[in-house]
Image (cartoon, rainbow, N blue to C red):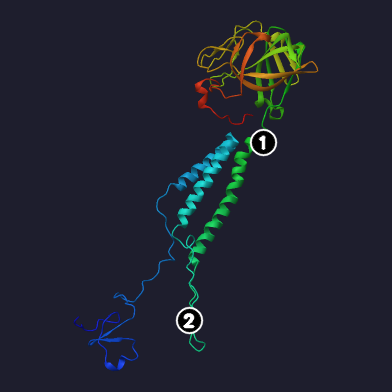
């Protein structure tokens, strides 16, 4: 090998004067000195400035969208069903975890610092190298996390009360209270009576409801394996099963026979052929079955009970159709649903969950 002019401190082979050979740790090879030390790079020894203090900006991700969808499902579930609430909470937690993992990937939060092994102690008289303290958690990262955490706390303080006032009323005082319609003697057998009552007297006339009540006479029912005679009533709601418009009896009313019991008004009918909706032409027979028009099912009905000779009206329920008539009719009963919703058949799959009803 032909020697070349010196190329800096990284040159592996260099000619040395004879008097340096004893202390330089080099051996003589022919007429050249061979450097046995580890080779160093030719590049400049100057190190580039570190960019660790710059915030880590993640790439585009779908995790925030999934988190937002989870929160939306959770809020909707608070109104619709606890099962939907649980699904929304699970989605929000999973996507929040994936989102945070993406944000912390490649930062000091996700990487454990390398711990150097302690070197064996040198001679007691030897000078120790100066210990340099390396910043494992930059101040900018701490300030960023503190700002985001404080913002989340403030956002929760501002948002949670608003959500409570918005969602809370849906779960307060739910249900329907039974209403006393008066003595059974106020309802002639075989005739419908247009009965109006206030479902919540504290709210006044705005809570007034209308039901068509017919006394079917006494019927025999089985109670604890025994046949017992009890009065039978048919109580039909006046809300059309199409869009909820008020249904009217198809026949004249006996206004002269009007009776009142507290806030309850009872107007008997003379004779009716069914019920009709004046808004969109829905028609029902005397049992509330749909016979024409756009309604999707029969008219809703009310449950009832007899207490001390008085008729008490209870909670409403939906009916797909009724077989038979009067006290011996077979009612196909379903959970209360909103107007326009199917309660049976394939169409009912479009309405799998019912929100709370007042």
In the picture, measured across the screen, residue 75 lies left or right of residue 107, that is right
Label 2 neighbour load within 10 Å: few <14, some 14-19, many 20+ = few
Q: From the image, which quarter does the N terminus lie in?
A: bottom left
Q: For the view shown, which residue lies furthest in the front direction?
A: 30
Per the model, the C-alpha gap separating discs 1 and 2 is 69 Å
**Which of the labelled discs sits on residue 172, or is there none?**
1
**Residue 322 spot, x, y in % from top left:** 60, 12
Q: For the view shown, which residue lies furthest in the left direction?
A: 2
Nearer to us in this view, 92 or 292 = 92
Of the image marks 1 and 2, the number of the one nearer the N terminus: 2
Element at label 2: loop
**Circle count:** 2
Q: Which residue is mark 2?
A: 130
Which residue sits at x=54%, y=28%? 352
**Which of the labelled discs sits on residue 95, or is there none?**
none
In the picture, measured across the screen, residue 61 lies left or right of residue 198, that is left
Which residue sits at x=76%, y=15%? 225
Label 1 neighbour load within 10 Å: few <14, some 14-19, many 20+ = few
């Amino acid at each position: 090998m032909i020697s070349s002019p010196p190329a800096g401190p990284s040159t592996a082979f260099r000619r040395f004067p004879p008097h340096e050979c004893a202390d330089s740790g080099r051996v003589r090879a022919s007429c050249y000195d061979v450097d046995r030390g580890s080779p160093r790079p030719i590049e400049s020894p100057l190190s580039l400035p570190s960019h660790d203090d710059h915030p880590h900006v993640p790439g585009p991700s779908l995790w925030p969208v999934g988190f937002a969808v989870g929160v939306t499902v959770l809020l909707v579930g608070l109104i619709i069903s606890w099962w939907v609430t649980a699904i929304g909470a699970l989605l929000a937690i999973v996507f929040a975890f994936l989102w945070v993992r993406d944000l912390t990937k490649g930062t000091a939060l996700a990487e454990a610092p390398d711990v150097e092994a302690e070197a064996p102690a040198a001679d007691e008289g030897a000078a120790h190298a100066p210990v340099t303290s390396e910043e494992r958690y930059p101040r900018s990262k701490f300030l960023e996390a503190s700002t985001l955490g404080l913002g989340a706390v403030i956002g929760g303080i501002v948002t949670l009360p608003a959500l409570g006032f918005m969602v809370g009323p849906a779960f307060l005082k739910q249900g329907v209270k039974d209403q006393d319609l008066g003595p059974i003697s106020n309802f002639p057998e075989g005739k419908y009576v247009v009965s109006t009552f206030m479902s919540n007297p504290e709210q006044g006339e705005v809570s007034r409801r209308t039901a068509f009540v017919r006394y079917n006479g006494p019927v025999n029912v089985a109670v604890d394996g025994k046949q017992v005679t009890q009065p039978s009533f048919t109580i039909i709601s006046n809300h059309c099963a199409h869009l909820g418009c008020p249904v009217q009896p198809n026949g004249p009313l006996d206004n002269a026979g009007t009776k009142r019991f507290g806030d309850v008004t009872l107007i008997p009918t003379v004779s009716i052929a069914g019920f009709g909706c004046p808004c969109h032409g829905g028609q029902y027979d005397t049992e509330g079955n749909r016979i024409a028009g756009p309604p999707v099912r029969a008219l809703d009905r009310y449950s009832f009970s007899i207490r001390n000779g008085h008729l008490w009206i209870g909670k409403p329920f939906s009916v797909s159709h009724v077989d038979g008539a009067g006290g011996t009719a077979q009612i196909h009963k379903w959970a209360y649903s909103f107007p326009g919703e199917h309660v049976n058949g394939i169409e009912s799959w479009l309405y799998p969950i019912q929100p709370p009803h007042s």
